Image (spheres, helix red, strand yellow):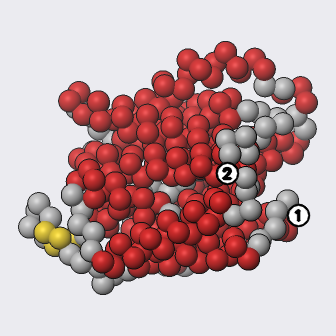
């Protein structure tokens, strides 16, 4: 089996891992564990895995002047991202969560416009409107527009989760081009964990471990270790043999996998409005990220699109937001 074939197989397996994560995480929340407790355990497991990997793959040190950016990336990409993901998932459906997550490139483009001056032409504006229209249709469909509505609130939390992750991508990009992605990931996770610890540690004693069975223990171990360690490793391996663009497009298998799993397990159903919303979001992302996009002069003299530069590093389209 050639390297490219192995890379595509790795991406297929990682997409399956991330797609399953939605329903598996949902099965734990909120009966077996609350979002704050799950975030603590997942980050602790992720850091342990990243530290272990770094023992074998030295990534180098990060300069002190860059730690404020690392801390901000940790706060947005880990703390806010993870807390709102699990809190939102506990209130809404796994399928809707996975669909909203595919709008990430659209939100990244908006942040790139406001933060680093990415130009938005008519075609990109159409893509943004299509994607946001789909997201709004998904969030508002048949729901009570009220903070008392758990489903509506959950969808908004997932939108905040994706927005925090999208801003994180813009902020962390300079670090990823300057240092080893493994070093950056490790310290971003550590900083994000530091923000979570004061609030989550007092709640750890309330996790009802005594009520866990084999199924719930397996789900917890899957969420804490498999989605981060194996998913990250497979993505990094794949990026050695295929382009970041190829890696990115595998992300769009996740809603299909999440939806299929939820339907097979009998936990959720797909409605007409959900399918229309999905089509709108995918259309918007396609319009924005297709290859014939406008080119901007990069600082190194080469012509590249800012939106593509943001995603051209390991994890740019990975599972960090889930």
The quarter of the image holding the N terminus is: bottom right
How far across and how far down the image is residue 280, in percent?
55, 76
Percent coordinates x, y for residue 227 in the rendering: 62, 50
Tag 2 residue: 145
Which picture quadrant has residue 186?
top left
- As drawn, 5 above or below 167: below
Quadrant of the image occupied by residue 46? top right
Q: Is residue 61 visible?
A: no
The relative height of residue 153 versus residue 79 in the rendered view (above or below) is below
State the residue position of label 1.
266
Farthest bottom residue?
292
- Left/right placement of residue 183 relative to residue 27 reads left
The residue under the point 23% across, 27% down is: 64
- Residue 135: which numbered mark, if any? none
> Which residue is rendered at x = 77% and y = 33% of the image?
33
Measured from the top left, where is residue 108 in percent x and y?
Answer: 38, 58
Viewer-closest of 187 and 117? 117
């Amino acid at each position: 089996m050639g390297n490219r074939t192995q890379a595509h197989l790795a991406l297929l397996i990682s997409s399956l891992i991330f797609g399953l994560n939605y329903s598996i995480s949902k099965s734990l929340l909120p009966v077996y564990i609350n979002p704050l407790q799950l975030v603590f355990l997942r980050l602790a497991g992720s850091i342990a895995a990243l530290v272990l990997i770094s023992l074998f793959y030295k990534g180098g040190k990060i300069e002190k002047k860059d730690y404020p950016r690392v801390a901000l990336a940790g706060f947005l990409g880990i703390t806010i991202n993870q807390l709102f993901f699990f809190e939102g998932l506990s209130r809404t459906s796994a399928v809707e969560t996975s669909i909203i997550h595919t709008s990430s490139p659209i939100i990244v483009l908006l942040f790139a416009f406001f933060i680093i001056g990415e130009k938005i032409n008519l075609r990109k504006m159409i893509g943004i409107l299509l994607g946001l229209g789909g997201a709004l249709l998904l969030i508002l469909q048949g729901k009570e527009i009220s903070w008392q509505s758990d489903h509506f609130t959950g969808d908004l939390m997932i939108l905040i989760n994706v927005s925090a992750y999208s801003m994180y991508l813009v902020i962390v990009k300079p670090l990823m081009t300057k240092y080893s992605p493994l070093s950056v990931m490790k310290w971003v996770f550590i900083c994000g964990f530091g923000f979570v610890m004061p609030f989550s540690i007092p709640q750890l004693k309330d996790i009802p471990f005594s009520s866990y069975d084999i199924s719930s223990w397996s789900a917890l171990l899957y969420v804490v270790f498999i989605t981060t360690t194996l998913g990250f490793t497979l993505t990094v391996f794949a990026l050695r043999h295929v382009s970041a663009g190829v890696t990115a497009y595998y992300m769009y298998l996740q809603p299909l996998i999440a939806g299929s799993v939820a339907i097979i397990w009998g936990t959720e159903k797909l409605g007409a409005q959900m399918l229309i919303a999905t089509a709108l979001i995918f259309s918007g992302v396609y319009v924005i990220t297709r290859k014939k996009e406008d080119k901007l002069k990069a600082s190194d003299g080469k012509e590249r699109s800012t939106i593509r530069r943001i995603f051209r590093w390991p994890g740019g389209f990975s599972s960090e937001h889930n």
